[in-house]
Amino acid sequence: MPLQVHQFPCLSDNYGFLVRDEATGQAACIDTPDADAILRELKALGWTLTHILNTHWHPDHAGGNAAIKTATGCRVIGPAEVERIGTAPDRVVDDGDVVMLGQTRFDVINTGGHTLGHITFHDAAHGAAFVGDTLFALGCGRLFEGTPQQMWTSLQKLTALPDATTVYCAHEYTASNARFALSVDKGPVLKARADAIFAAREKGEWTVPTSIGLEKATNPFLRAPLLRPDIADPAEAFGAVRAAKDGFKG
Ligand code: ZN
Ligand code: FE
């Protein structure tokens, strides 16, 4: 049975995601950027929230936990670091754990780097990954807590997923990511994708979700070793591209 995914923009550039296991009607929100928006969308859909699944502790991902839990009585599942936002998850999960939403299985993958305890929820049966702030369309999360080596290892776990995997990123950063990508990669494949992205954003269209295959072909962070052949170590090449983005004034 399919997993329904409802995506909606909230805050200034976040996406909210509500997912529902059709077989049982159990529903979860992936992160809680905006409690009011999430509760409003739930009401419009007529879904009953049973779970919050957090990717990391940042306020635009876990800040709505308390209000949504109070309003719905749902169960909070996430990494231990979510405690930093005020209340510990009802269930702490990390790499290798399995979270069931009705009959839908999410495998938890530790994708630390943006924050140390960041996790991804991967639904292999439906080919969907909720990656929070680890991987973006043409981008990746800033290294607020982790090292380039840790983030590179995390990104390698994501690129090991099937190319057709749908990647639900938590932010619409794609146009600015594309401007940076064009500054480090002059190839025609990226150019074509960047043109399509700029056109889509002009029309107000979303560029999320993306896919593992598309990111492997064009994302400058995943392609860092190719873009920086002067650096032998892949994680160091990644670190150099990440540092260039941090200093990029596009
Ligand atoms: Zn974040
Ligand atoms: Fe975020």
Image (spheres, rainbow, N blue to C red):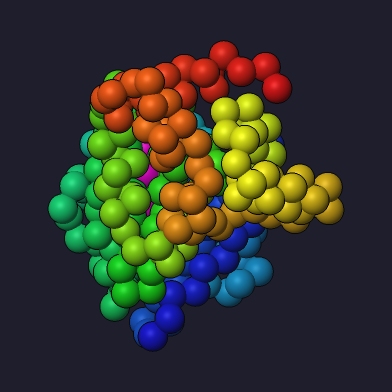
Main SS class of the magenta portion in the image: loop
The residue sitting at 16% across, 53% down in the picture is 96
Relative height, residue 247 to residue 111 (above, below): above
Task: Indicate left or right for 203 with 181 as reference.
Answer: right
The x and y percentages for residue 150 are 26, 29
Task: Indicate left or right for 200 with 83 as reference.
Answer: right
User: Looking at the rendering, which quadrant does residue 23 occupy?
Assistant: bottom left
Relative height, residue 179 to residue 208 (above, below): above
Identify the magenta region.
Answer: 53-57
The residue sitting at 59% across, 54% down in the picture is 208
Q: Is residue 45 magenta?
A: no
Q: Quadrant of the N terminus?
A: bottom left
Relative height, residue 118 to residue 196 (above, below): above
Q: Residue furthest top?
A: 247
Residue 116 visible in this rendered orientation of the protein: no
8 or 226, which lies in front? Answer: 226
Q: Is residue 56 magenta?
A: yes
The x and y percentages for residue 51 are 37, 59
32 or 17, which lies in front? Answer: 17
The x and y percentages for residue 137 are 55, 46
User: Looking at the rendering, which quadrant does residue 34 occupy?
Assistant: top right
Residue 55 visible in this rendered orientation of the protein: yes
Q: Quadrant of the C terminus?
A: top right
Number of marks in picture: 0
Q: Residue furthest right?
A: 203
